[in-house]
């Protein structure tokens, strides 16, 4: 028989020293505060942080992509259109598996060229990607949290590129939806192209973009489990790991297959989160509609009058 | 976008200019979902046979080691692209894997695999669950009459038997025994199957230095009997050296 695991002291409740003797709520309170569960709670924070950083970055990518796609400078326009078309067309999972490894190796290759100019061996040796130790990213001897942060940063960048392409398409459409008369009037007042863009087009396009962007936000919330493909342990990973049946030989808290309960908790979390998002988005929409020459803006004006 | 990539690259360049010695830290990649070989304990740390073995091997080879978990599916690609330096995850040495990575000397004998099922099942005509990309999955695929059902994690293969999706599961016997003992519904059936060439540490093919260090450490553990002690402690049904 494998030995019984070493008793792990729970730092929150003092009565958790011998879980086998506990029952009911007391057992549950100990179970839910093990170090492993703490990792899951921490993962909720990771997911929220990812969303908080990715959303604005993706929006910036989208804005850049949309502006490029309607540029009067042809190569820039081609670049914008190609970005939107190519990234939207590739399945997320393929993008995540291939692109991230390629991106990581790209960074390492650049560092390799700079840091080890005397290196003679080929970088590709059969299946292996071999670069000098100093060029490793992060360095092999860096602590684990550096590796994790690096993985997280790659995840943000990849999410931003993917969702940025969709956002670019939404914004591109929104820019065209702004009534052309507005732009012509601006020109008639003597505004330059740049002034028209920043003073007339951009402030008015958001109301047309928001429904599409809010869709994207909802999809982004649910796409976070893709994080695990990048080696970041997210909440779905932990729900699967913690929920799987556990034998008494390997844990102080043996239990049968509880994945259903863990996934139920995730369901509640995601539903609550999307509900909060909806409320916030509705408020933003109401504010953006104010004073706009749209049906909703007109209704707002009449209600106030 | 350009700015972001550029600033990331600049950050990465200035981050640490110190030259690292070759393998000053060896990162060990494992799955963390295959007790008793490797699993995550209540404290959230890697534990099990391979944890104890790996720590001892690193001590003997005078390496500083760090544990990393990675999904089974992408465990070889991530080794090859350099995200960690060795795989220590109950991975049997096979010719197919040898084409892609190198292995240290084996640290277990070829381990018996077994079928686990609810009640008596004729495995030759059954639907058999196995973890994807394992020697067991390859074995079931080669069984005439049996249907292979693959899952990403070991835990899901057992769950599939319990909810009736599969008739039986084929996995390492050391993994299935504790489950059969603690769960009255399922039991080991039929005869054990001997597949695979024993378990070894996987390393990049270009990394012969690390492979030789690990092999030397394994040989020294075989010679003084400490490896057998670990096998008896964690894998009671397996053959010793």
Image (cartoon, rainbow, N blue to C red):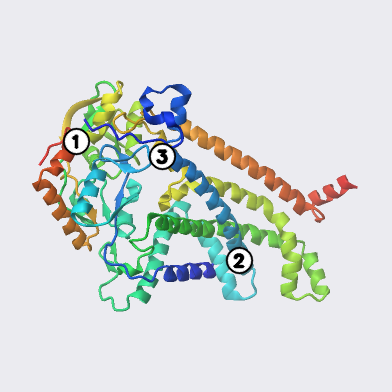
Q: Residues within 10 Å of mark 3 (few under 14, many from 20)?
A: many
When the figure is inspected, residue A207 is found, relative to residue A73, above or below; the finding is: above
Q: Residues within 10 Å of mark 2 (few under 14, many from 20)?
A: some
Instruction: Give me the residue at 51% from left, 32% from top.
Output: A264
The location of residue A89, given as percent across then percent down, is 51, 57
- A273 versus A179 height, above or below: above
Q: Is residue B184 left or right of residue A177?
A: left
Q: Which residue is mark 1?
A: B233
Identity of the residue drawn at 11% across and 39% down: B240
Label 2: which secondary element: helix
Number of marks in the image? 3
In the rendered structure, the answer to whether residue B92 lies left or right of residue A211 reads: left
Q: Position of residue B31 (x, y in %)?
A: 32, 45
Mark 1 and mark 2 on one chain: no
Say whether mark 3 and mark 1 are on the same chain.
no
Question: What is the C-alpha distance between the residues marked 1 and 3?
Answer: 24 Å
Q: CA distance from mark 1 to mark 2?
A: 60 Å
Q: x%, y% of residue B141?
A: 25, 39
Q: How many neighbours does mark 1 have within 10 angstroms: few (below 14), some (14-19), or many (20 or more)?
A: some
Please state which of the two labelled residues, at mark 1 or mark 2, is closer to the viewer.
Answer: 1
Residue A64, disc: 2
Residue drawn at x 71%, y 46% is: A282
Question: On the image, numbered disc 3 is attached to which residue?
Answer: A36
Indicate which disc residue B215 carries: none
């Amino acid at each position: 028989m494998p030995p019984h695991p070493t008793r792990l002291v729970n730092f929150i409740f003092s009565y958790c020293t011998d879980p086998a003797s506990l029952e009911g709520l007391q057992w549950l309170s100990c179970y839910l505060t093990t170090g492993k569960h703490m990792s899951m709670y921490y993962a909720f924070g990771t997911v929220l942080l990812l969303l908080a950083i990715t959303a604005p970055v993706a929006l910036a990518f989208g804005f850049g992509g949309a502006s490029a796609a309607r540029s009067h400078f042809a190569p820039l326009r081609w670049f914008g259109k190609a970005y939107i078309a190519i990234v939207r067309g590739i399945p997320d999972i393929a993008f995540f598996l291939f692109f991230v490894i390629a991106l990581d190796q790209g960074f390492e290759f650049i560092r390799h060229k700079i840091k080890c100019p005397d290196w003679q061996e080929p970088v590709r040796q059969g299946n292996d990607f071999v670069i000098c130790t100093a060029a490793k990213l992060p360095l092999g001897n860096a602590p684990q949290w550096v590796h994790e942060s690096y993985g997280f940063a790659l995840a943000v960048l990849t999410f931003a590129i993917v969702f940025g392409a969709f956002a670019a398409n939404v914004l591109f459409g929104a820019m065209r939806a702004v009534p052309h008369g507005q732009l012509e009037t601006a020109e008639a007042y003597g505004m330059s192209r740049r002034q028209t863009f920043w003073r007339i087009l951009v402030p008015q396009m958001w109301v047309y973009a928001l429904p599409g962007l809010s869709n994207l936000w909802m999809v982004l919330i649910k796409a976070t489990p893709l994080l695990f493909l990048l080696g970041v342990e997210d909440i779905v990973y932990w729900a699967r790991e913690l929920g799987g049946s556990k034998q008494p030989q390997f844990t102080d808290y043996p239990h049968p297959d509880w994945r259903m309960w863990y996934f139920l908790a995730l369901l509640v979390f995601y539903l609550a989160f999307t509900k909060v998002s909806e409320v916030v988005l509705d408020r933003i929409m109401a504010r953006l509609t104010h004073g706009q020459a749209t049906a909703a803006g007109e209704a707002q004006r009449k209600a106030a009058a | 976008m350009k700015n972001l990539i550029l600033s990331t690259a600049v950050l990465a360049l200035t981050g640490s200019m110190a030259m690292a010695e070759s393998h000053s830290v060896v990162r060990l990649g494992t799955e963390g979902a295959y007790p008793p070989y490797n699993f995550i304990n209540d404290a959230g740390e890697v534990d099990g046979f391979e944890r104890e073995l790996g720590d001892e091997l690193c001590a003997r080879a005078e390496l500083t080691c760090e544990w990393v978990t990675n999904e089974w599916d992408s465990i070889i690609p991530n080794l090859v692209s350099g995200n960690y330096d060795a795989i220590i995850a109950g991975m049997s040495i096979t010719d197919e894997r040898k084409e892609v990575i190198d292995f240290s000397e084996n640290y277990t004998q070829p381990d018996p695999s077994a079928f686990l099922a609810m009640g008596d099942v004729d495995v030759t005509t059954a639907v058999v669950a196995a973890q994807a990309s394992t020697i067991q999955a390859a074995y079931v695929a080669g069984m005439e009459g049996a249907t292979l059902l693959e899952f990403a994690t070991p835990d899901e293969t057992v769950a599939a038997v319990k909810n009736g999706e599969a008739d039986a599961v084929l996995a390492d016997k050391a993994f299935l025994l504790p489950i059969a003992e603690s769960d009255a519904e399922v039991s080991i059936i039929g005869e054990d199957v001997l597949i695979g060439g024993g378990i070894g540490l996987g390393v990049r093919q270009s990394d012969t230095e690390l492979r030789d260090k690990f092999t030397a450490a394994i040989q020294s553990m075989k010679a003084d009997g400490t490896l057998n002690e670990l096998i008896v402690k964690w894998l009671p049904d397996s053959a010793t050296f």
